[in-house]
Image (cartoon, rainbow, N blue to C red):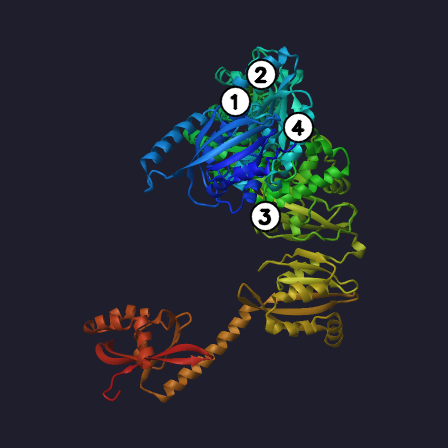
Amino acid sequence: MARYHFSDQEQSFWESLQQSYAVFQYDGGVIPLALSDGFVQMFGYGSRESACKDLMRSKTVYLNVHPDDLAKVENAVYNFIYHDEKYDIVYRARNGNARDYKLLHSQAKIMETSDGVKLIHVWYTDEGIYSEPFEELNTKLNRLLRSALQRENYIKSNGFDVLTGLPSMSYFFEYTDEWKKKMLQENGKPVILFFNLRGMRYYNQDNGASQGDNLLKSFAKILTHYFSKEQCCRMGSDHFLVSTVDENVEKILSNIFENAKLINTGISLPVSVGIYSITDPEESTSSACDRARFACNSLRKIHESGFNRYNQDLLDKYTKREYIITNLDRAIQEKWIKVYYQPIVRAVNSKVCDEEALARWIDPVNGFMSPADFIPVLEEAELIYKLDLFVLDEVLEKLRMQQEFNLHLVPQSINLSRTDFDTCDIVEEIRKRVDASGFARNLITIEITESIIGKNFAYMKEQVERFQKLGFPVWMDDFGSGYSSLNVLQNIRFDLIKFDMSFMRKLDEGKEGKIILTELMNLVTSLGVDTVCEGVETEHQRQFLLDIGCSKLQGYFFTKPIPFEEILIRYKEGRQIGFENPKTSSYYEIISRINLNNLSIISGERNINNSGAYNSLPMYVMEVRGDVGYLLRSNQAARDFISSYYLVDLNAEGAVFIKNDDAFRDNVVDTCCKLGARSFYDEPLTNGNIAHVFARQIAVNPVTGYHAVIMAVLSISSPNDHTTYESIARALAADYHNIFYVDLNNDSFIEYTSSEGSDRLAVERRRDDFFTFITGDFIARVHEEDRQKLISVITRENIIRKLDDAGRINLTYRTVEDGKITFLSMKITRIPRRNNIIIGISIIDSQMEDLNLMEQSQRRLEILTGIMALSHDYMCLYYIDLQNDHYIEYSNSQEFASLSLNSEGYNFFSMMVSNGKSIVHPDDMEEFVTRLNNDNVKKQIADNGFFQHKFRIKLNDEYVLIVMKVAKVMDKGQEKLIAGVRKWRERN
């Protein structure tokens, strides 16, 4: 419809009115045609044009309404236009940016022109400034108007949503009940649309509640743009309902999705919509809305806008859903729901180290219901907390019974859902139940899936930490099933990571699956976190996981989930797997975590050259029982090595590999187990070759005392070309802390280390860049005053030249680590007939310290001897180090020596006071103790330059008056004290 225009005379008349007056044209919306001078002034506009622009933008007949009155005003306008109701309303509004609201009384009438155009005439009366009860402007009229306003707002707020101004649910249901019947009578196709803004709760947390409110209000305006206001309703939170016809509804929804992307400057949310077609006029609107919501919720795993129609499949699911929700409490009470337990087995000893508690619903009507049937339903209905707490109660009862049967207790893991944390304080609920049971908290493990962590990361991190601070271990379940796994690992410290069973399915699809799982296992174990892999079904999978260091295994290979009653039956019949002794758990955890395809576990370096015939180094773990080693774990290379050289096929059933030869006893039993040192040794093989073996102890079983030792075959050589590393090691280990064996042909080197007093060397690292290493990482630890001297010598050219000239090179230098200076000696020599050198480094701190002490002692003796030579009266002199309070006595008086005072020690003045009790005159003792105080002596020296005190001591059975004098001297830039004792004379 074209815009209506007044004549110039009419336009001038309306605009010149001093009464606040406005005329609008109604055309599906309102268009301002004329605004009076009184209107412009009342609402604080500088011009009529700016007022018109605001009204055009808002498409309303009101401006700057108080938020609490907005729904009421919108409703009044709506009923005035669409239902011919009287428009006579009092509300609060303010002009422009004014702080205070004023009370406005607004009235309106619709008048029709001769051309049939509907014009809305609205006039506004200013009833004064609106004041709160405590403000001074509290006139009688104002109070009456405010009271009326509050009564009216109360009535309106029960019929409309305060935030969006949409009709309330009761209004919507009443309207739709009548509307749908009318539509069906006219052969229409009424539908209910259920809208859900996905993720509103987290949107508010990230952007603030005010932004969330703006989003809801903007979305409500989109709905009223496509549907009449009475067809819409806000159901609560982020849910909306619409009743409309099916025609073009999918196209309209597509437009709504596009519009929704743009609201709040693009900071919006995806919209899910469920569509339910009403065919029965007697079906309640409430039931229709519930089914539309069910169709909407079927989209919960889709993170973009979309819709779904309610159909027969959803009807079946809806029926089952209603049955599950209705019967949950009864199922718990009558034990239709049972708890089954699936063992989690320690990889290295095949004992049950944990159990996972799983709920099974065995229904009298529907039979066995899969967890996939009832758990999502209970999560959606926010009732899952009832199930999870029931499972916990059953687990605690099971532990009690297990204890009565004298079976080892192992931790029981229970699964929690995201809604557990929303519907109750699940952390506190679990704590109360476990504490009431009397069992230790660490017997209950909490499993949380990776997917629920990402829904509110900060909040879930806080809950994980709450559990852990209370002593409950927390595992991440289904690791690798989502897209945020590594981010979660970086930010939340879990006690164990459970790998999703999808990894097991991919193991047999190609090498890529094995590589990915191996590297992920390396990553997790490097963080010091335990691991378990679920879905293990074959021996091949078990062995592979054992090789790469997966510490725990779970799957049908061991057993399916079973009730506790069946566990007891298996024990009775001797078919049980067996529970692990908890006292040995930490021992087996260490053994299980080791990745036998990563040599850095042994040496600390990855790049170790393997000259043997294996793709990876043979590595295995032996358990030493007495003098005999029993194989616990091995990688494939080790199994091939043992098969080739020891003729033991470890793949054969019942095969056992043991070691008790001399080399094993000398180097593994004696060195690793008894001394706790690492060992590098040569082991003769059955074919005459020699294996160069590395070994170190990794754990001791606290129950049996057995030692676990990890071993690696670094290389294999024949006797003809073998330069015996052990012969070098034994000759040099006793004298050197570090030895570098350098090949000058290619700069490769091996670094060996030995512990103090040992004649064994251990490989520390192998690399191919000796001179880069020595001038980089190595020189960085050298004292800066010694670096240039060292760098100038240890170049390739200078080493060769000096060795040609003198046959050997000797250097002394210092290193600094954590502020501590260490003196070292470096000796370099050449191996005959080879282009190799050996560099030996030994610590010479003790020699340097002895030398320094001798020099200091000699210097002090010279100083004190000189003093005593100048003053023959001194009976004794003491030299006191202020840095450590150490003192030394220098005496030339037989008379004073008879007192038998300590000639060397610490805390000189305390020593004098202590000995004074037996030699100082009783009358002098009190002053003697007071004045010979360490702090007093230093104060007197600071004030007077010296300290002096007279007192009597017993010499040769009679008391003699003596004087002690203490003064400060400087010795090599450091302050020292010299204390002298002599007999008193009048001219002192």
Q: Is residue 513 visible?
A: yes
Determine the CA span between mark 3 and mark 1: 98 Å
Name the disc covering residue 253, or none. Answer: 4
Q: Label 2: which residue? A: 179
**Image point 26% across, 80% down: which residue?**
962
Which residue is labeled 3 in the image?
673
- Residue at 65 percent of width and 64 percent of height: 778
Q: Nearer the viewer, mark 1 or mark 4?
A: 1
Image vertical order of residue 943 relative to residue 762, above or below: below
Instruction: Tell me whether the residue at label 2 lies in contact with that at label 3, contact meaning CB atoms closer than 8 angstroms.
Output: no
Give the residue number, with chain letter if any, for mark 1. Answer: 84
Displayed quadrant of residue 319: top right
The answer to whether marks 3 and 1 mark residues whose Cβ atoms lie closer than 8 Å is: no
Mark 2 closeness class: few <14, some 14–19, many ≥20 residues within 10 Å: some
Q: Earlier in the sequence, mark 2 or mark 3?
A: 2
The residue lying toward the viewer, choosing from 885 and 563, is: 563
